[in-house]
Structures are given as structure tokens and as C-alpha cells.
Amino acid sequence: MLNTHNYKLDNTYSGYDKAKKRKLDLKMEGYRVKIQKNIEGLFDVWIKDILIISAQQDHGNGRKGNI
């Protein structure tokens, strides 16, 4: 289950191939992207905002994250 505090819904697609293409496009723009199949059988594309990524970069187990 995705944490909707960190991720927001970008769009919903009927096929996995379309969702995967959108995921690759968003990754090229610098977003972290997840694809999740919803209960209707459609594929939701979730993105993590770039500002949240940079704020969370130095959190965790003491190591610096790689972006």
C-alpha cells in the first residue's frame, strides 16, 4: 500500500503498457513513480514530488541517499 502522504495520483490507465510508458516519461522528469493495480483492474500511476524526495534524502539509517 502506498503512503498517500508522500505520493499523489498522476493518472489511471486501462493497460499496463500505457502506465509503464507514463512511468518512464515521469522518471525522466525526475519523479519517483509507482504503478498500482486498483480494485477495478485499472492501473494507477503514483508520483512522489521532487521536493519531498529532497527533504527525505538525508533521513533513515544515517547514509546519504542517491538521487
Image (spheres, rainbow, N blue to C red):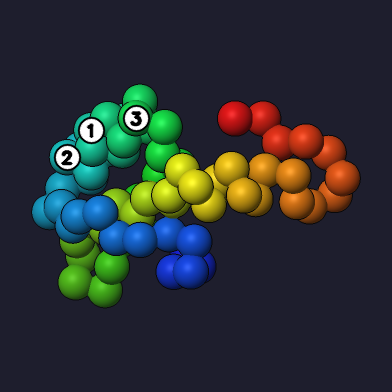
Q: Residues within 10 Å of mark 2 (few under 14, many from 20)?
A: few
- Residue 62 badge: none
| Residue kind at label 3, given as amino acid type | Glu
Secondary structure of the residue carrying tag 3 is: loop
Please report whichever mark, 3 or 1, sits nearer to the chain's N-terminal start.
1
| Residue 62 x, y percent position in the rendering | 87, 45
Mark identifier at residue 21: 1
Would you say the residues marked 3 and 1 are in contact, meaning their CB atoms lie under 8 Å apart?
A: no
The image shows residue 25 at horizontal and vertical percentages of 27, 30
- State the CA–CA distance, disc 1 to disc 2: 5 Å
Farthest residue to the left: give it.
14
Question: Would you place residue 40 above or below residue 23 in this image?
Answer: below
Measured Cα–Cα span from mark 2 to mark 3? 17 Å
The residue wearing badge 3 is 29
Q: Residue at the top extreme?
A: 28
Residue nearest the observer in this picture, 38 or 62: 62
Q: Residues within 10 Å of mark 3 (few under 14, many from 20)?
A: few
Residue ID for mark 2: 18
Image coordinates for residue 32, horizontal then vertical, percent: 45, 42
Residue shown at 20% from the left, 55% from the top:
11
**Closer to the camera: disc 3 or disc 1?**
3
